Amino acid sequence: MPVGSTWHRPSHTPGNGIHGTETVDDFFSGQAAALAGGTTMHIDFVIPVNGSLSAGFDSYAKKTRNSVMDYGFHMAITKWDEAVSKEMELMVKEKGINSFKFFMAYKGSLMISDELLLQGLEKCKSLGALAMVHAENGDAVAEGQRKMIDLGITGPEGHALSRPPLLEGEATARAIRLAKFVNTPLYVVHVMSIDAMEEIANAKKSGQRVIGEPVVSGLILDDSWLWDPDFTTAAKYVMSPPIRKAGHDKALQAALSSGVLQLVGTDHCTFNSTQKAFGIDDFRKIPNGVNGIEERMHLIWDLMVETGRISVTDYVRITSTECARIFNIYPRKGAILAGSDADIIVLNPNSTFEISAASHHSRSDTNVYDGRKGKGKVEITISQGRVVWQDGVLRAERGSGRYIEMPPLVISSMVWGKPTRTISLLFELLSGALNLRCKVLESLRLSQSDVQQR
Ligand SMILES: [Zn+2]
């Protein structure tokens, strides 16, 4: 079964400055893992250097020398002044970036205020760029962390306890409303909880253009690992927003199959156990991030298609096509068509996979999916017309990756500003359909209320 495969979201965030330590995967190892897992393009997050977007862009461009597959960039916005505003324009018009990420968490480093978020949203709208948010209430997270430390809870479980789902729900709701106020689309990255997902579902129901992206870890894992008495085991599951209690995963799966959530990212951001051990006495110092780029296609097939939750066509859409469309590189990517890039995979639904830290291509010494088995294995990956993965052998060529420029989007202010009669009617029909979806979600949530109350 051939599948054109693009995906989006960071394979790695080298030197991301959030935790003062570099991820173990670079463009070579992260992309090698991607190719072995049937992903042929990734979009990485560029973090500005001392607030300078150009300096950030240049420093990331240098890191791509050993890239082995195509890639693009999102850019984070971490402060606001006239220079940043001008540089956003430069990034869109000359550097091929059409999306910017705003961190509502990481107080004291990357977090931005509502005022900056508003200005950023306005700027994105005027440039035809997509605004993305890391949605957690950073002030409340800092307060939650302080409480945990005061209580003497310093282990990895403190990570989950200090930033509960409601803080993700609150920030998601706030970002959605601010985007509505500005009248521009919003992309919510790594949706990890029912709370955030329901805010997205409600916004969509009202006709607002909000894109919700779950990641592999949120769809598959639950937070029980964070309570493992062995620090090394527990720490490898630390990421933000945190992996949630069992029940959130099932709800996110349902939202993905019903279209409330649109595509699957990975947030692949790997640190080895030595780096994770920086936080052995204080969970706030554990570098945040889990693997997923090599596992994504396998695990999502097994979880969603093998179980009958979605069709094969849906699988292609959520792992590839949707991403290419959203970031305006369709049909060059995300399709097998004359004129499209020859990025194709062959996935055998009858062959089985087993995930192991000993055999994966990431440089990390751990794997959050270690020991997992399932059906649906990527047997061949073709990138830029070359077979780069076959029979378990990787033939990645250093320096062969190309930077894919992503053109600005068309952001029409009419769509939910002043709807015409036809559009209103369309919305009514749409809301009807979404209402139905939400009912399904609601009943699902009811059945999970016991889980949530724990
Ligand atoms: Zn994030």
Image (cartoon, rainbow, N blue to C red):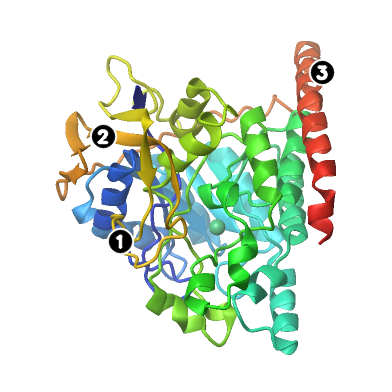
* Residue depicted at x 55% and y 88%: 281
User: What residue sits right under mark 3 in the picture?
Assistant: 428
User: In the image, is 386 to the left or to the right of 22?
Assistant: left
Front tag of 3 and 2: 2
The residue under label 3 is which amino acid type?
A: Glu
Query: Looking at the image, which is closer to me, 369 or 281?
Result: 369
Residues packed near mark 1 inside 10 Å, few (<14), some (14 to 19) or many (20 plus):
few
Front tag of 2 and 1: 1
Mark 3 → mark 2, Cα distance in angstroms: 43 Å
The answer to whether 92 is drawn above or below residue 84 in the figure is above
User: What residue sits right under mark 2 in the picture?
Assistant: 381
Q: Find out whether the residues at labels 1 and 3 contact each other: C-beta distance under 8 Å.
A: no
- x and y percentages locating residue 243 in the rendered image: 61, 59
The residue under label 2 is which amino acid type?
A: Thr
Give the secondary structure at mark 1.
loop
Q: Name the disc covering residue 358, or none.
A: 1
- x and y percentages locating residue 196 in the rendered image: 72, 49
Q: Can residue 373 be seen here?
A: yes
- Going from N to C along the chain, the mark reached first, 2 or 1, is 1
- Going from N to C along the chain, the mark reached first, 3 or 2, is 2
